[in-house]
């Protein structure tokens, strides 16, 4: 067989289509990672100028998985701190209800009002904290500001 193989030649319009696809993907990626507009423009310009070999030369290395772990840990810590603060607030409500000789039912109402809890949950909290000896908080205790 003496015929030559023919290969399609690259046309300029084909290359431009590929560049447009890469530019679109680059803009999308930069948006997903919350890159600054200036950074996005520089990356896209490098693609358009066909200087993609230098696309990542100044980028700082980062691990998206590590960032996700750090974010999850920070969220968990914030959630725990919020829950702890709520428990402290409930303890203070009960302490001051007892100090001013209010009933347990009045404490439940205060917990519902101040903590946004339904009656059943507020009752459970009152039952939990009504009997135990509470910490003695000083008048300057920052937790008291929660009740003001």
Image: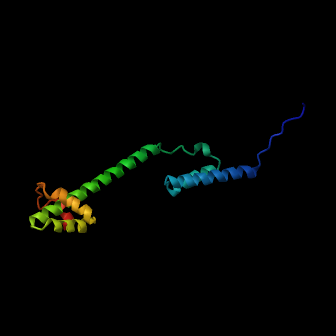
Q: Residue lying farthest front?
A: 120
Residue 85, quarter of picture: bottom left
Above or below, comparing residue 129 to residue 106 in the picture: above
Going 57% across and 51% down the picture, which residue do you hit?
A: 43
Rendered position, 124 above or below 54: below
**For the point 77% across and 49% down, which residue is it?**
11
Depth check, front residue: 61 or 115: 115
Quick one: which residue is furthest to the top in this view?
1
The x, y position of residue 104, in whole percent, is 15, 65
Q: Which percent across, then down, holds residue 55?
A: 57, 46
**Picture mark count:** 0
Name the residue located 46 percent from the left edge and 45 percent from the top edge: 64
| Image coloring type | rainbow
Q: Is residue 142 visible?
A: no
Q: Is residue 97 visible?
A: yes
Q: Going 89% across and 34% down the picture, which residue do you hit?
A: 3
Q: Position of residue 26 (x, y in %)?
A: 58, 51
> Can you say which quadrant of the picture contains the N terminus?
top right
Q: Image quadrant of residue 131? A: bottom left
Left or right of 39: which side holds 142?
A: left
The image position of residue 112, as x and y in percent, is 24, 67
Position of 139 relative to 61 (above/below): below
- The part of the image, by quadrant, that contains residue 102 is bottom left
Of 67 and 117, the residue lying toward us: 117
The C terminus, quarter of image? bottom left
Comparing 96 with 124, the one in front is 124
């Amino acid at each position: 067989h003496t015929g030559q193989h023919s290969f399609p030649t690259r046309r300029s319009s084909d290359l431009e289509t590929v560049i447009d696809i890469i530019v679109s993907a680059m803009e999308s990626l930069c948006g997903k990672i919350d890159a600054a507009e200036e950074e996005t423009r520089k990356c896209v310009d490098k693609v358009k100028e066909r200087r993609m070999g230098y696309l990542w030369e100044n980028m700082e290395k980062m691990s998206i998985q590590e960032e996700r772990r750090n974010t999850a840990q920070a969220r968990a810590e914030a959630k725990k701190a919020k829950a702890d603060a709520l428990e402290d607030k409930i303890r203070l409500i009960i302490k001051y209800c007892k100090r001013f000789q209010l009933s347990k039912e009045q404490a439940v109402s205060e917990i519902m009002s101040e903590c946004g809890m339904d009656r059943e949950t507020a009752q459970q909290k009152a039952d939990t904290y009504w009997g135990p000896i509470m910490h003695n908080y000083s008048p300057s205790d920052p937790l008291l500001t929660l009740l003001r």
